[in-house]
Image: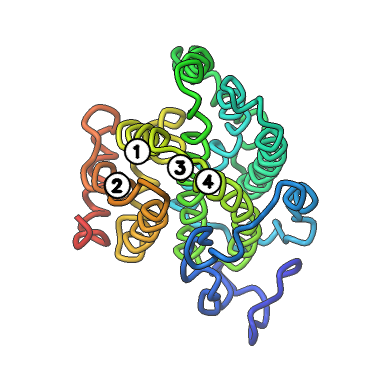
Amino acid sequence: MTGVARPEGSAGPVPGGAHPPVPPMPRFFEGHIRSAVGRRRGAVTTDIDSLIRRSGRLEVDDIDFGAFGRHPLDADTLRCLRYMHDVEGHTACYLRDVLATRAHRDPQVTAFLACWCYEEHWHGEALAQVLAAHGEPAGRSRLAASRRRLPRRDAFRPVAFTLASALTPHIVAVHMTWGAVNEWATQAGYGRLAAKARHPVLSELLRRIMRQEGRHIDFYALGARQRLADSATARRLTRFALRRYWAPVGAGVMPESELRFLVAHLFADGEGRAATQRIDRLVGRLPGLEGLHLAEAAVDRLACRPSTQTASPVERSTYQNRQEKEQRHAC
């Protein structure tokens, strides 16, 4: 393959459409989460000027997207990528909600959010290229269709966020913490997908995305830690909001059946459970948030039973077969 170095000893494409020999996953993927609190505690001193200088479009010019034509991804991986593509493309809508709060008064926060939205846009564009290489709809046309399917209540979200911001000065603490949890979960999801797909080109692309997500984690986690440490009210409010309302990234935007599939595929096995436990440990190290177990609870809720309301009989049957085959011990 071009663009990504061949695994040592690989002689080129394998006949019959099989993947080329894949080396063991690099240590980068072993933890799946770039810890902004704990393992990297001493490194989390990122100021906004440094983040802006390092921000930019995801480098993909040397990625061999043609390799997906020669060695296509399996159906489950593509289904997860569709979900991730659509959620990355929804970032501007999340930004709309945050800027409706008093967060827009903080120039440090708004400078970060501008970089964050820009980088997330290019993450979605990179995933679109993977989908397009498989003949899948991707990019703006797919996002336009996705946004047309949003529920009517989505139009009222900016009003709700504005009202919440008017009621409490601590809404930014909630946003920073929520963002940290979502970025930890997103980075873990990319790591799990790379580990399960074991496709060298996809692994390299996701590694680059995860690296940029790590910078987002730095800012969100540091901002959350500082604001939570400064106010007992902020800690109580944030804990209540997370316990009552937090759900995995994409919930409320993507169909529930797709959310359940993604959670089950990536996090319901033993390694996935370990990844959710690491997320929960990171959340628990933030002031006032110990013992929430948000990620594990989400897997219990979403991956260990099919939806009786949104999943079709075929989806429920497929889910049960998958449970019996690879997730029996998790549920």
Q: Amino acid at mark 2?
A: Leu
The answer to which of marks 2 and 4 sits earlier in the sequence is: 4
Q: Which residue is mark 3?
A: 228
* Residue depth check, mark 1 versus mark 3: number of the one nearer the observer: 3
Observer able to see residue 56: no
Q: Which residue is mark 4?
A: 226
State the SS at label 2. Answer: loop
Q: Which residue is mark 2?
A: 292
Q: Rounded to the nearest whole Å, what is the CA distance between mark 4 and mark 3?
A: 6 Å
Residue 300 in the figure: left or right of residue 156:
left
User: How many discs mark residues in the rendered view?
Assistant: 4
Q: Amino acid at mark 4?
A: Gln
Residue 7 in the figure: left or right of residue 155:
right
For label 4, the crowd category at 10 Å Cα-Cα, with few meaning under 14, some 14 to 19 and many 20 or more, is: some
The answer to which of marks 2 and 1 sits earlier in the sequence is: 1
Identity of the residue drawn at 29% across and 39% down: 315
Q: Which residue is mark 1?
A: 239
State the SS at label 4. Answer: helix
Disc 2 and disc 1 in contact, CB within 8 angstroms: yes
Q: Rounded to the nearest whole Å, what is the CA distance between mark 1 and mark 3?
A: 10 Å
Disc 4 and disc 3 in contact, CB within 8 angstroms: yes
Q: Position of residue 144 (x, y in %)?
A: 61, 24
Q: Rounded to the nearest whole Å, what is the CA distance between mark 2 and mark 4?
A: 19 Å
Give residue 97's quadrant in the image: top right
Q: Is residue 71 above or below residue 24?
A: above
Residue 241 in the figure: left or right of residue 128:
left
Q: Amino acid at mark 1?
A: Arg
Q: Is residue 174 above or below residue 194?
A: above
Q: Rounded to the nearest whole Å, what is the CA distance between mark 2 and mark 3?
A: 15 Å
* Residue depth check, mark 2 versus mark 3: number of the one nearer the observer: 3
The residue nearer to you, when weighing 172 against 83, is: 172
Q: Position of residue 50 (x, y in %)?
A: 75, 53
